[in-house]
Amino acid sequence: MASYTAKDITVLEGLEPVRRRPGMYIGGVGSPGLHHLVWEILDNAVDEAMNGHASHIDVTLHADGASMTIEDDGRGIPVDKHPATRTSALEVIFTTLHAGGKFDGQSYKTAGGLHGVGASVVNALSRELIATVKRDGATWEQRYKQGAPLGDVKKLGAARGTGTRVFFRPDSTIFPKTQFDPAIVRERIEVASYLHKGLKVVFENEGAKGDEPRKEVFEHHEGIADYLKKILVERKARAVHELPFTVTREHEETGLKLDLVLQWTESTDEHLRSYVNGIPTGSGGTHENGLRGGLGKAIRNFIDTHSLSPKGVTLTA
Ligand code: 28F
């Protein structure tokens, strides 16, 4: 037990607890819980992009309004069989609850969790889920019902490229309402596309909720600088300088990346947003407070040198 520490433990268990007490895993079975399923799958695709392996994500809300397909052009979830369990990695990811800290001695950790971890929760709470992987020159597929595989991983035929696609239909025996809200999905995709510079997300609403079918492309090459511009327009805050202040740094020791944009405006109020790996870190946390503390001097200096004292500043980070 010498090298065995609590943080290395990976507990793998079946999905029954998820169906028995869904609220423990997705917060509840109302609208936020239903949309949580989308965020779990979308986050896995975004993680694959953040790790530098994918650049394009397609999100489709199907015409019935109660099923979705999310696809990335990443490496594709491995389909080979684990020698010890004789089960494919794909099946393990979709049918096993990952309660631990490491996976197979290799860490796939991101701030949002372990790579692929939420997929089994989505599967458990779906009446139908189809995982399709393009990898090693072929297309592979496995289908599930309420989290249980309907068969083995099947090789469907030759394929070009790589990637992962997940179709799922939430289970109406779990969720009283299974209709997704296109506006909620759209907003989440839009923010993700600003936070992850260069990521391209195409959102297709096939016509759910009686909407006209439409496709929207979200891609921002200037990342949070573009987000800041949009926020200024929304808040009707007029800029006092054209270009935002930007800080883009990578920490030498840890490789952690910092991305910061600041804009002074004529508005009297201050506005600050912060994220860690795409997840909002609200007021009162160390990320915002640390930034505020360090920025205080910079702000006072800017105000003094530009004689802006009667007016406020808008800070967006
Ligand atoms: C539409 C949702 O879930 N995309 C994902 C990957 C890629 C890898 C991966 C995911 C491997 C063994 C844990 C590929 N090649 N989109 C997604 N793309 N998960 S989820 O790996 C998971 C680990 O078990 C991947 C090499 N390493 C990782």
Image (tube, rainbow, N blue to C red):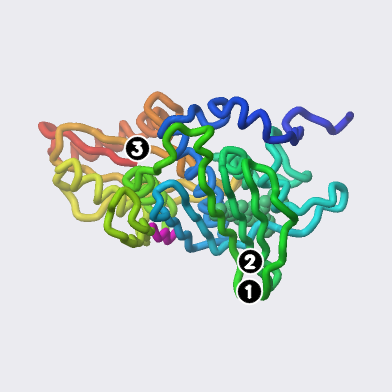
Quadrant assignment for ligand 1: bottom right
Classify mark 3: helix, strand or loop.
loop
Q: Name the disc covering residue 273, or none.
A: 3
Image-based side of 16 in relation to 163, left or right: right
Quick one: label 1, few (<14), some, or many (20+) residues within 10 Å? some
Residue under circle 1? Answer: 159
At 66% from the left and 57% from the top, the residue drawn is 77
Residue 251 showing in the rendered view = no
Predominant secondary structure in magenta? strand
The residues tagged by marks 1 and 3 sit, at their Cα atoms, a distance apart of 42 Å
In magenta, the rendered stretch is: 198-203
Three-letter amino acid code at the position of disc 2: Lys
- Give residue 313's position: percent from left, percent from top: 20, 36
The residues tagged by marks 1 and 2 sit, at their Cα atoms, a distance apart of 6 Å
Residue under circle 2? Answer: 134
Based on the displayed image, in which of its 4 quarters is residue 14 positioned? top right
- Quarter of the image with the N terminus in it: top right
